[in-house]
Image (tube, helix red, strand yellow):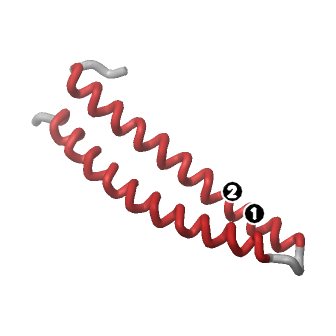
C-alpha cells in the first residue's frame, strides 16, 4: 500500500475543507465583532462577546497550524523523509 500517495491526496482534500471552514468561521467572527462594537448597554455582555471572538480567533489559528502540518506532510512525502 502506498501510504504516501494516499496521505498527500487526503491532505489536499482536508486543506480544501479547511479553507471553506475558515472562510465561514471568519464571517461569524466578523458578525460577532460588529455586535460587540454595537453593544452599548452592558459592558459585561460586550466582554462575553469578546470572549467568543477570541474563541473564533484561536480556532482559526489552530486551523492554520493544521494546514501547515498538512503541507509539511506533502513535502516530507516528496523528500521521502519526515521533518
Residue located beneath label 1 in the image = 50
Extreme residue toward the left, this view: 1
Q: Quadrant of residue 37?
A: bottom right
Q: Position of residue 46 (x, y in %)?
A: 81, 70
SS for callout 1: helix
Q: Which mark is residue 54?
A: 2
Q: Is residue 56 above or below residue 15?
A: below
Instruction: Give the class, few, some or many, for how many residues have Cα within 10 Å of label 2's Cα (few <14, many ≥20).
Output: few
Q: Position of residue 35 (x, y in %)?
A: 71, 75
Question: Which part of the image, by quadrant, shows the N terminus?
Answer: top left
User: Who's the residue at 32% across and 51% down the image?
Assistant: 14
Q: Position of residue 49 (x, y in %)?
A: 74, 68
Q: Quadrant of residue 38?
A: bottom right
Q: How many marks?
A: 2
41 horizontally vs 63: left or right: right
57 horizontally vs 21: left or right: right
User: Who's the residue at 23% across and 20% down the image?
Assistant: 79
Q: Which mark is residue 13?
A: none
Question: Which part of the image, by quadrant, shows the C terminus?
Answer: top left
Q: Quadrant of residue 50?
A: bottom right
User: Who's the residue at 89% across and 80% down the image?
Assistant: 41
Closer-to-camera residue (26/61): 26
Q: Is residue 55 above or below residue 49?
A: above
Q: Position of residue 2 (x, y in %)?
A: 12, 34
Instruction: Give the class, few, some or many, for how many residues have Cα within 10 Å of label 1's Cα (few <14, many ≥20).
Output: some
Cα–Cα gap, marks 2 and 1: 6 Å
- The answer to whether marks 2 and 1 mark residues whose Cβ atoms lie closer than 8 Å is yes
User: Who's the residue at 22% across and 20% down the image?
Assistant: 80
42 horizontally vs 18: left or right: right
SS for callout 2: helix
Closer-to-camera residue (38/50): 38
Q: Is residue 28 above or below residue 83?
A: below
Amino acid at each position: 500500500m502506498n501510504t504516501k500517495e494516499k496521505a498527500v491526496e487526503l491532505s489536499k482534500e482536508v486543506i480544501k475543507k479547511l479553507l471553506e471552514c475558515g472562510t465561514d468561521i471568519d464571517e461569524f467572527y466578523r458578525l460577532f465583532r460588529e455586535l460587540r462594537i454595537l453593544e452599548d448597554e452592558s459592558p459585561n455582555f460586550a466582554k462575553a462577546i469578546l470572549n467568543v471572538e477570541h474563541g473564533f480567533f484561536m480556532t482559526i489559528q489552530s486551523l492554520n497550524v493544521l494546514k501547515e502540518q498538512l503541507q509539511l506532510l506533502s513535502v516530507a512525502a516528496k523528500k521521502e523523509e519526515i521533518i
